[in-house]
Image (tube, grey):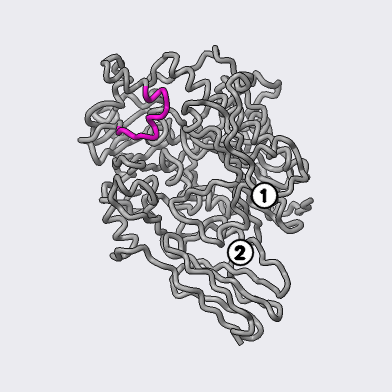
Amino acid sequence: MMNTSFKAIFNIFIGGIIFFVFFNCQDTKNVKEEVVKGAPIELPKKPNILWLVTEDMGAYIPPFGDLTVKTPNLSRLANEGVIYPNLYSTSGVCAPSRAAIATGMYPSSIGANHMRTTSNTEQTGLPKYEAVPPSQVKMISELLRINGYYCTNNYKEDYQFRAPVTAWDESSAYAHWRNRKENQPFFSIFNFTETHESGLFEPYGFRQIETRHYRAGDTTYAWKQNGLPEAKNRIAEEDISKHLPKDTKFNIPTYLLDNEVTKRDMWKLYNNIAEMDNQVGAVLKQLEDDGLLENTIIIFYGDHGGPLPRQKRLIYDSGLNTPMIIRFPNKMNAGTKDEQLVSFTDFAPTLLSLTGHAPKKYMQGQAFLGDYQAKNKRNYIHAAADRFDEVTDAIRAVKDNQFKYIRNYRPEQGYYLPLAYREKIPTMQELLRLRDEGKLNDIQMQWFRDNKPKEELFDCKADPYELNNLAENPDYKEKLNELREEMDRWLVAIGDKPNLPEAELINQLWEGSDVKPQTSQPLLYYSNGKIQISCETEGASIGYKVNPKSSKIPDNWTVYDEPFSVPENAKLIVQSHRIGFKPSKSKTISLSDLR
């Protein structure tokens, strides 16, 4: 049981709060509204950080006003925490957005903007490649490991690049904070896949995935010893219906069809959320069982907007906006709402700030909490859409608290591009069928236009589905110019070149080479009784394992940060890896060989 002392004090300012009450039909605890006036918040010096990450998630849960399905665990988290309604991903799809989370950089600034850089090679004719950030860029988990944290990821990665061996203490279906050293602070991520768009495919049924043993509440589970739990079994529909009756009435967006096909997909969507909430609750129970709840900052969020057609992959708010809840130790600021704009690029600097370290200068986001939170809150969020699997577009967006500006670099292309994976969704199939029969109304047909305007401007408060383009309206000329100039500034600041052919992007990332760059082998030295390791590849991370004689080789890699001592007769296993490059081969060497 961790017993970290409460020492560090920092201020969290929650401004612009309007009184609200969320009536949650599943419990009697209403989320309260309070105006927080910069009261000092006392937190652990090195708080544990627990991320609960779901996929393809719009604001479909009671704490954000949607009472369709009960989510007792997320509702409790909101009652005891702070909700953030204005979190935006940098892309309407997972891998580019996760690249931003992992690095604190915009995907289009590091070559991570095209969804699936290691697949679809037959359609694109391109080689497999990875994003290549500047040499100084490290994954946020590696930075936290250097600062003493035990970092685990359970279990999806998907960053548009291969994570170096230095990124995690554990990254697997069994990764857990419980394997850390006594009293070691942890950063643990649990990814929940139930809400992914593939959960709308037929035949429908919950997948029995790796986290099912959490629900059993077995705190003696033998991690990593029992093999992967079976994933092939599905729960029958009649058992799923206990979450949500099939005759439930849904608030169907006007850009979708109000028919039985759409209703069934929305029934699946909410059932998947209920199942995800069950698993969230099981992880939270383990945290409580371990006596760690009040030493831990818990952050729940989705990896981008919703899973339905005209949501995922688009950079309308339906594809970018995702709910976030943060529970601080001792229910600090419980039941309040923080309406500031937050970007996925802000996560990495905020993690450093919460753990007492200044954000790295290369990070393009800003800390919104902690000792080093930015003096000024965000005025804008930015997003991009490029290639998604086999289809390519080039769109950029900027938004303030009310207005969204979109610039289309391929106006001759329609918005809708045929994407095989998305067309597995019954609602998508129904839209295409009725489009071909000429039975869609004007709103539903907007997505299927043959071309699109070069510029779009939407009032997202008056027009939340972004259907009424104001770019040609003279009453909004000043706002259009403001957001247009902000986009120009942002593109230059991050070095984004929209519509750059992907082949040219790869050429730039590989610095003119025809082959993926390779990380150099690590170089080892023995001096003054200590091992020193270097690598000729600028910015390479170096990981090592010490294998004393007659001892088991450690499972995880240690991040090399400074010279270290090793026992006599020990062997070292070393590997270097710069993000976006091929890693070096693992190198095993005896201490005697270095003398």
What residue is shown at x 58% (from left), y 38% (from top)? 192
Give x and y (percent) for residue 115. 38, 45
Q: Is residue 349 above or below residue 64?
A: below
Which residues lie in the magenta part?
A: 417-429
Give x and y (percent) for residue 395. 31, 40
Q: CA distance from mark 1 to mark 2?
A: 16 Å
Q: Give the structural element (helix, strand or loop) at label 1.
A: loop
Residue 557, numbered label = 2
Give yes or no for residue 336 being in the magenta stretch.
no
Residue 176, numbered label = 1
Give yes or no for residue 420 being in the magenta stretch.
yes
Q: Is residue 230 above or below residue 565?
A: above
Which of 371 and 181 lies nearest the eye of the viewer? 181
Give x and y (percent) for residue 64. 56, 27
Give x and y (percent) for residue 536. 45, 75
Res. 480 image quadrant = top left
Using a 10 Å C-alpha cutoff, classify the residue at mark 2 as few (fewer than 14 neighbours), some (14 to 19) or many (20 or more): many
Identity, as a three-letter code, of the amino acid under mark 2: Trp
Res. 409 image quadrant = top left
In the picture, measured across the screen, residue 111 lies left or right of residue 553, that is left
Q: Are marks 1 and 2 in contact (CB under 8 Å)?
A: no
Q: Earlier in the sequence, mark 1 or mark 2?
A: 1
The C terminus lies in which quarter of the figure?
bottom right
What residue is shown at x 58% (from left), y 47% (from top)? 155
Identity, as a three-letter code, of the amino acid under mark 1: His
In the picture, measured across the screen, residue 103 lies left or right of residue 293, that is left
